[in-house]
Structure formats: structure tokens, C-alpha cells
Amino acid sequence: MTYETILTETRGKVGLITLNRPKALNALNSRVLAELVAAVTDFGSNADIGAMVVTGSEKAFAAGADIKEMQALSYADAYTQDFFVGWEDFTRTRKPIIAAVAGYALGGGCELAMMCDFIIAADNAKFGQPEITLGVMPGMGGSQRLTRFVGKSKAMDMCLTGRMMDAQEAERSGLVSRVVPASDLVEEAVKAAAKIAEFSLPSVMMTKEAVNRAYETTLGEGLRFERRLFHSLFAFEDQKEGMAAFAEKRKPNFTNR
Ligand code: HXC
């Protein structure tokens, strides 16, 4: 697929995806969705890639779903196409994806960041769910994921008033894992992804699966699920290698086997 709305590159074992619709502040239209899904699927199946970063520009990670594309949609169109269902494909990749957010992450932009495994924010980042101001509501997971990240009170506040949260408030509330200077954002996110990509891929993928399971199940079931995954890692040579390397005071050489 020839990409028109995103840029992709590899930096070592990291796949970097940059949203690239500057004139529309990276608004997410169906082309962007198709290209993002293609890019994460491609990096997901590339054995040389261990983790990914999705970023935008310094002004906007993404200012939302494309309002101009949605404007004329009828209920029949939205329902029969199951509008936005394609975003579920974005979340299917088993390798970690870090969202590196600078500037606006609004509506679908905030929701896209939350679909990633964690968010690193630039100090100029602004998060919001302003759909209410357009006469609609979050439609790509905002009412569910934001509530799990920041709790009911702040999620209601954000979704009902449409106000924006700055990077510091987002970090205080648990929406983002860390805040870095805007000028260092991509470098810091790639560094974090590169760190992850050094580890044994099976343990990385199982860790992602286990943490995500915490959102889907009870504590008891989640603990059992975690324990089974943990047991299964002893079937990999990487467990022997990782523990031997510790005992021998050397760097492990993981082979993903
Ligand atoms: C389409 C968008 C867009 C969007 C910005 N643009 N956001 N186009 N969809 N979501 C376009 C503008 O129309 C404009 O195009 C250009 O990008 C620059 O935007 P400006 O508004 O001129 O920039 P600025 O004054 O700096 O304001 C930035 C902004 C503002 C505060 C981010 O653009 C804004 O409020 N955008 C909309 C944010 C929003 O409501 N997002 C939620 C969308 S709904 P032109 O051609 O005029 O230069 C959603 C989920 C839907 O995401 C789920 C439920 C159905």
C-alpha cells in the first residue's frame, strides 16, 4: 500500500509511524485508518521489529476524527458500515505500541492515543473529548477507555464539558506515563520502544496480553491467566538465557525462542 497520510520508518528494531495530514491537524479519516492498520499489521509481522511508536506533529497528534468526512453521514450509513469498527483492527497487534503525543490529541486523537499501550506526552500536549460540542459523543472508545484511565469523575468532566487537559494534569490523572520536553518527544518514545524491543518478544507480548486482560476480567481470573502465561515462559530458551545471563553477570542474548 502506498501511504498518503502517514510516514513510516524503522529505527533499529522500532517501527515509527508519523501521522501526516498537517493541513487538517492529522484529522483521522478513513484513509488514515486504513493506512494505520496496514502499517501496524506490517510492522507486527516483521520479525526485525520489536515495538512501535505512533506520533503526529508538534502542533497536533490528531485533532480528532475527520469532522468533514463524518458531517453528511446518515444513521443508515453509520449503522450499516459499523462506522469506526475498523479501529478495532488497530488494537489487534500483539507488539507494543507507544503513543508519542505533542499538541492536540482531541476526540478520536485522544482515543487513538488510548488504543496504544501507553502514552508519552510532550509538555505542550492537550487531551480532550470535545465531541459533545459537535452534538455527538465519543465513538472510538473515549467513554470507556478514558474512564478506565482517569476514573469516573474526571472522565465525566472531560466528556460532558469538552474541556482540554494539559500534559501535567494528564500525567497526574494516570492518562500518560510520562511527560518530556516537546523537542525530545520522538527520541524519548523511540528510546522507550527500543528498550522494549531488546527484550524477549514472547515475554513482551505476554506482558501486553496480561496487562490488557486486567481490563477485561475479574482479579481472580486475571491472576490465574497471568500465572499460566508466566508458567509458559519457562518453555522458552529465552527464560534460561535471561536467568543465566543474570547469574553470569552479562547481557542476555534473546533469540525469541
Ligand atoms: C477535520 C479538522 C479537524 C477535524 C481541525 N481540522 N480539526 N478537519 N476534522 N477534527 C482542520 C480545520 O478545519 C482547519 O482546516 C485546519 O484543520 C486547521 O484547524 P484550525 O481550526 O484552523 O486550527 P486552530 O485554530 O489552531 O485550532 C485547533 C483546534 C481546532 C482547537 C484543534 O481545529 C478544533 O477544535 N478542531 C476540532 C476538534 C474536535 O472537535 N475534535 C473531535 C472531532 S469528533 P481549514 O481547511 O479550515 O484550514 C471525533 C470523534 C467522533 O473525533 C466520534 C463520535 C462520532
Image (cartoon, rainbow, N blue to C red):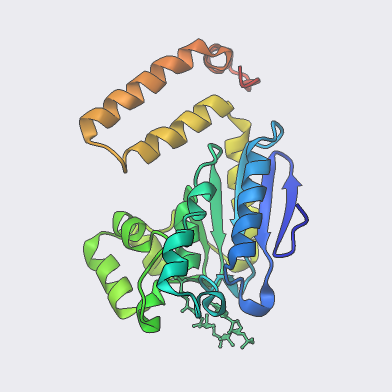
Task: Write the residue at 55% across / 47% down.
Answer: 97
Residue 221 vs 18, above or below: the answer is above
Seen from the viewer's position, the closer of residues 251 and 175 is 175
Q: Position of residue 98 (x, y in %)?
A: 54, 50
Residue 96 vs 88, above or below: the answer is above
Residue 18 seen by the camera: yes
Quadrant of the frame with the C terminus: top right
5 vs 234, left or right, is: right
Task: Write the residue at 50% across / 11% down.
Answer: 235
42 vs 65, left or right, is: right
Ligand 1 sits in quadrant: bottom right
Q: Position of residue 55 (x, y in %)?
A: 61, 60
Residue 194 seen by the camera: no
Seen from the viewer's position, the closer of residues 197 and 219 is 219
Residue 152 vs 234, above or below: the answer is below
Q: Position of residue 78 (x, y in %)?
A: 45, 66
